[in-house]
Image: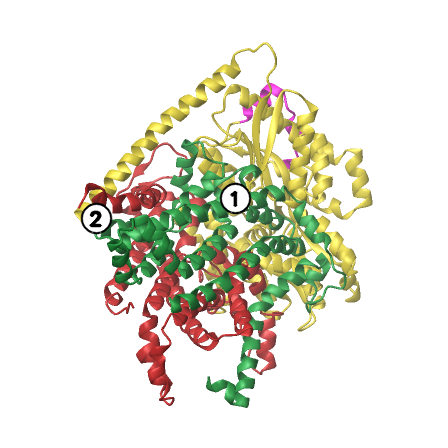
Chain colours: A yellow, B red, C green
Amino acid sequence: MKKIASVLLATTLALSLAACGNTTSNASNDAPASGSASTPAPEKKKVEITYWYSWGDKIGENNENLVKMFNESQDEVVVKAEYQGTYDDQHSKAQAAFAAGNAPEVWQNEISSVGVFAKSGMTEDLTPFVEKANLDMKDFIPGLMGNSYVDGKLYALPYLRSTPILYLNRTLLKEAGLDPAGPKNWAEFEEYARKLTVKDKRFGITMPVDIWTYEAFVRQSGGTMISEDNKTAAFNTAAGIDPVKLWLKMKKEGTMNIVTTDDAGTQAKTDFHNQRSAMQFASTADLTKNMIVAEEQGFELGTSFMPANTTFGVPTGGCNLVMSAKLSPEKQEAAWKFIQWMTSKEQTIYASSFTGYLPSRVSAVESDEMKKLYEEKPLFKVAVDQLAYAGPRPMQKAYPEIAKILKDEILRSVVDSSVTAEAAIAEAAKKADALLSK
Amino acid sequence: MTLWSRLRPYVMVAPSIAIFSIFFIYPIFYMIYLSFFNWDFINPVKEFVGLDNFTELFRNNEFLQVLSNTLNYTLLTVSLSIVISLFLAIWLNREGTWYGIVQGALFSPHIISLVSVSLVWMWLMDPQFGLLNWLLQLVGLPKLEWLSSPDSSLLSLVLVAVWKGVGYNALIFIAGLQSIPKDMYEASALDEANRLRTFYKITLPMLSPTLFFLIIINLISSFQVFETIAIMTKGGPVNSTNTLVFYIYEYGFRYFKIGYASAAGVVLLVVVGLLTLVYFKLLSRKVHYQ
Amino acid sequence: MPIEQRPLLKVLHYLGMVLLMAAFVIPFLWMISTSLKSYAETVIFPPKWIPSKIMWSNFTAAWESGPFLKYFMNSVVVSISILLLQFTTIILAAYAFARYRFKGGNLLFGITMVTLMIPGQLIFLPVYLLMSKWGLLNTLFALILPFSSSAFGIFMLRQSFKQVQEELIEAARLDEAPEWKIILKIMVPMARPTLVTFALFSFIAHWNDYFWPLVMTTTDAARTLPIGISKLREVDGGAAWHILMAGNMILVIPILIVFSLAQRHIIKAFVYSGVK
């Protein structure tokens, strides 16, 4: 045994020493490159930067198209766009890349992760760039800016953003003699679901236990997720318990199908698409696809605000653009140029009409192009109007873990009738407090 | 003995050992090292916390559940798929095109990427509209919740794993069966009444190297289950299908607790190591080599 | 065999085989069917097996969604290089472990077995950092090198080398045949079934591998098919099952070919090895 250990230790030591040796040489390899580039050269040399994005299909095309347009629009910066899987994939790869010293210059943060990456020093404070460029921050829609500031400093600008909305199968609503405009509040929502349910054939609504949706319901009840000092969970109140109570009640009545598997989100979509459910809470990003499916399946699609309890309310979702920390001034300049271009009025109009994500600037919403689009496709307008009631997602480092705990505890009450909504939320709050107090 | 003949074995294993040391052994030591620290990947300072990560692990009910999930999943999957595939192998071990085709069909789940496999099974197991519940009702049995309930979710995953692995195991069993010399059966074939005896006296002992090999390979791969979990359940509902590797990955890369995740990784190594060791000690003596 | 002599048993026997086959092939057929549907038909209930209109365009849509030719070539180069390297390293190592007694041999074999127990998810970070230091990220080397030997292969092959009769080798040694000749002319042919089986498993595993290439590459230049296909899945607004399954069909066809070749080979190889 001793021999084994000593041999292995020796190998590891040798290897880790080699690894350490390489770190320094690697750093010095980088230095001359950036050094020579920053000395004023006679002819202008293009600065090359890398941009990481998530998701393929339409969203991927949108990213590739915009980058191509940016590269053609000027001759100082060349951006390479690279696909990196889901947001989670992109985040863990960015961590590994940062540790290895080859992080991309510009990348995406799913909005609840902006805080984690800013606090750990992976992303750059953009405040000086905004000041220097004299960027009018008031033009960004305030409801979308909650996940951009960390400790009073700006770390991210809104890019592909969404909110949950209520999708309606208007054909079925009309058949059931309901107002096709959709339910305004929770009581009406229950009523709608009841009237739309046909036993063994259709549910009023199919829903996953999804914390994004839960955040919406809490906000509608006038509550928040985490206390203002970030030290405790704030959802162990009536505002946090009522949503679960409502869900459990509707599930018991058989008007709401709560899917507990991991593909619940997909299944909610599928149910809505083939009319096994008449309503659906989903991201605005699904609108384009839902419109196509509704037409193929022959039903009339509607959208409305998520119903109110004491008030309307939704969290926002999607991703913001960030710049990696500790870049050379030259790369910073290039990265900033790209971020500024990507989030400006014209590009937000392009991205919004191409993908169905929300436009992030007031001037874009008021532009003729968007107005025309909203006239042609009024369904798009609902999400933009709902932004007046939208707010940020929590950004604490422990939040991904808290979200998982919440999901587990709520699911426990869904699958086990002996667990009440109160008990589930109390348990989740207890665990969340323990995480937050660390 | 010349110098060369003494050096030869080392030279022959050197390439493999070098690769293993660099890409597997070194990372393990790195992981063991990290398990004594509190680190989030990015912070240049790693905080030394001694055994704190381990005490936290074993105080965490969630982790204990994950451990028991992993053990249950592994034992069930391995025993079921070994028994079923052995049965199938004996049944299908015959000459003829048809048998070849059926053997191929059994193997097909192993060829298809896990994404497709998982999607199809999620569709089959849908509690409302899935094919399996439809079949159950057809023969007058009650519907099951499959992946939707914490009571049946782990078993459902075992079912998928067995379905996926049986063809692979059966193929190796068939190969093993065919390498048993025919004359060994001839003596006992006269006495047709006692086929079970033949199985215990001849087939099983002659098959023991194959059996041994398959049990080990299945144990290890079941213990490391990751992709099915990541695609089909993400450990849910209510942590009922969360297993070690998935847990480690989530803590390391979603919750930024690399020290804690590494500690869980060390536990994984210890458990798999022990399993293998016990297995070697107990069974290697009983395995019959030709 | 007695079954063939009793009609009732015979019927049951074949019925059993058909049911068995169905249970295992249905998902595969579903995959083919879905790959030829329109999106609307993929979600309707009850599901339809035969699409009302065959959509070959799904395949072009999948193929054109990215540089699929590049992905395809990368997949081929990676899987085949891994296989060739593995053959070289594992035959040498397995022979040494099976046929020589040498100091530290057990320790080295122990290291090999430990390797077998480590999932990629546990070790990718340090390996990523190493690759980055060596400047190999985003090259096919990052996908090939860590797998250029296989503990699984050594384990499998060592067993079948051990089963080769001692007399054969002794006879060869008396004829003063060099060791490399013994390996190539005696051991490898005797272990052919094992080698073919291993090759098949190794090829399938690396051809379908999603996790490792995803982690080690950031650009299309070094990416493989499974990543190209995941791009079809990871759509924020709901999955395009039909295109996704078309992509998966593109992924699976080469394996089907390899498998149908290898399966016959495995069975045959065993029949011959019985004869000696």
Label 2: which residue?
Answer: C104
Bounds of the magenta span?
A126-142
Relative to the observer, which residue lies in front, B258 or C97?
C97
Label 1: which residue?
Answer: C77
Q: Is residue A247 above or below residue B42?
A: below
Q: Chain of mark 1?
A: C
Task: Answer with left or right where residue C170 lies relative to residue A393.
Answer: left
Say whether marks 1 and 2 touch (CB < 8 Å): no
Residue B221 lies in quadrant: bottom left
* Helix, strand or loop at mark 2: loop
Residue C191 is a magenta residue: no
Kind of residue indicated by mark 1 = Val
* Residue C45, position as x, y percentages in the image: 69, 67
Kind of residue indicated by mark 2 = Gly
Relative to the observer, which residue lies in front, B176 or A124?
B176
Earlier residue among tags 1 and 2: 1
* Residue A122, position as x, y percentages in the image: 47, 32
